[in-house]
Amino acid sequence: MAGEQITVCAIDDLPQGEMRLIEADGRKIGVFHCTDGELYAIEDRCSHDDGPLAEGEFDTASCTVECPRHGSLFDLRTGRPRSLPAYRPVETFEVRLDDDEVKLEL
């Protein structure tokens, strides 16, 4: 079943190494542009204590983000934590480029 598709921004407004935080369906979602040119989106909520992941350090080369509260490292590709204290994954969303626009599937 296909979900709702929303336009995040033009690709020129989200250069490699940058992140954009959006709100959709009452959820905050971080859209990340890694240095490999790939786009990833995860919910902006650490599975350990609901911390704001988008405020954490974004490592563009490894495509990870670190929760600013307790340091859990999350893989942007899978939503899975790479370090404790988080052990549950966060939700990921499909992102694609369509006519130079970044699109997010909810």
Image: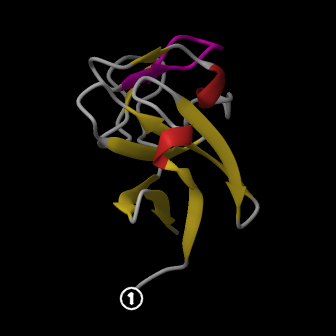
Residue at 76% over, 61% down: 26
Say few, some or many: other residues with alpha carbon within 10 Å of mark 1 (under 14 / 14 to 19 / 20 or more): few
* In this picture, residue 72 sits left or right of residue 24: left
Residue 11, placed above or below residue 24: above
Q: Can residue 85 be seen in this view?
A: yes
Q: Assign the N terminus to one quadrant of the image.
A: bottom left
Residue 45 appears in the rendering? no
| The magenta stretch spans residue 5 | no
Measuring 27% from the left and 19% from the top, which residue is drawn there?
62
Q: Which residue is drawn at 40% across and 57% down?
A: 95
Classified by dominant secondary structure, the portion drawn in magenta counts as loop
Q: Indicate whether residue 67 is drawn in magenta.
A: yes
Residue at mark 1 = 1
14 or 6, nearer to the observer: 14
Q: How many marks?
A: 1
Viewer-closest of 98 and 42: 98
Left or right, residue 45 beside residue 84: right
In magenta, the rendered stretch is 64-72
64 is higher (above) or lower (below) than 47 = above
Type of the residue with mark 1: Met
Residue 40 in picture, x, y percent from top left: 39, 44
Q: Is residue 71 above or below residue 78?
A: above
